[in-house]
Amino acid sequence: MLYCASGLWRSSCLFRLCLGLIAFCFVGELLLAAEHPVPESPLWLTYSGGEGPGKGRHIILIAAEQEYRSEYSMPMLAKLLSKHHGFDCTVLFSLNSRNEVDPTQKIRWEDKTVSHSIPGLEHLKSCDLLIVFSRLLSLPPEQLQHIYEYLDAGKPVIGIRTANHGFLDFQYRKDGKRVDFGEQVLGGSFRSHHGRWQQDSTRGMIVQENREHPILRGVQDIWGTSDVYRTYPEGGHLPEGCLPLVDGQPLMGRKSDDAPNPDLIALPVAWVRTWTGNKGLTARVFHVTMGSAQDFKSEGLRRMTVNAAYWCLQMDGQIVGDSCMDIVGDYSPPESGFDYRRLMIVPRLPEFYR
């Protein structure tokens, strides 16, 4: 009886210990989830950062365009930034009236009644960095106001591809004059396709005189299937204050080893600058005009963009040339384009893209 009682006592202690460990793990997971600065919602995606240089910093990524499959690439970047680099990340989308991510929504140039919506923009107030990939959006004034306030807050911005023509009816003013988000914040607006739209691809070439810039640390190869944008008039140059990092050479086809187009010069596709809003606070800005979901299969483009996040947050000294840029999970985005039926692009809930 003594042996049995002793055995039962030990079993009871072991059982209680197991329960305690389970409870500890459960509470730990809840606490970890609670640490993310944005509450979970079916309207957006949140990714809690692990250990890494970005621990305690929060990045908001906006996926809100109709052509380049940002609904795939921005969650991919968010997972990479959170898992490998420690940043808390939130992905906001342009949603339709059924709260679905809907790249097939028209723009106001096609339908004057169209209005877009990005739920969650109010969280810009507390984030540390905005990565924006939008195209020709018509947002309600109360949502645009959150962007205006962010621009005044002295916090950094990364603009990807169509972000330089990301908004219609953009009414932000500085010194009484209306500000063009692409031209004056990012450093250049889309003027034309420099080459053959959806036929060329782009070979990124590091600007040698600026090769020591921290954003280019470890960047060795950049190639993507999107074409080069012209952001300034022929014979011109980037606006004063822009530092070019990468030029894009149009190729004759959509393979990485295609020959350069002999009739087209290379134009800047990535640069940095600063922006100062109405409150006199200055922020770092990085703009890259490459960036389709297919382009982000290039480790060089991923590394440059992640390095830019560090640089924008003034974490230059923590940029490591061989840091992990591996894609987390499956990444098989559809091709770019507006042929939604062929590409099987349909409205989907945000959770689909997690």
Image: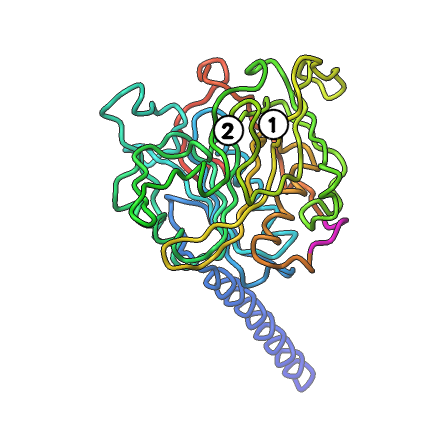
Residue 320 colored magenta?
Answer: yes
How packed is label 1: few (under 14 Cα within 10 Å), some, or many (20 or more)? many
Residue at the farthest bottom position: 2
Q: Earlier in the sequence, mark 2 or mark 1?
A: 2
- Place of residue 342 in the rendered image (x, y in percent of width and height, measured from the top left): 49, 13
Quadrant in which the N terminus is drawn:
bottom right
- What's the amino acid at mark 2? Arg
- In magenta stretch: residue 277: no
| Residue 51 occupies quadrant | bottom right
Q: Which residue is mark 1?
A: 294
Amino acid under label 1? Answer: Gln
165 and 60: which one is in front?
A: 165
Q: Residue at (53%, 52%) from the top-left corner?
A: 284
* Residue at figure coordinates x 29%, y 47% from the top left: 176
**Rendered position, 273 above or below 194:** below
Q: Magenta residues, as a range?
A: 319-323
SS class of the residue under badge 1?
A: loop
Tell me where residue 294 appears, x and y as whole percent: 60, 27
The residue depicted at 56 percent of the width and 32 percent of the height is 289
Is residue 126 shown above or below 197?
A: below
In the displayed structure, does residue 353 sit left or right of residue 148? right
Q: Nearer the viewer, residue 187 or 299?
A: 187
List the residue tagged with mark 2: 69
Judging depth in this view, the residue of 47 and 114 nearest the camera is: 114
Whether label 2 touches label 1, CB < 8 Å: yes
Drawn side of residue 205 relative to residue 95, left or right: right
Could you say which is closer to the camera, residue 79 or residue 210? 210
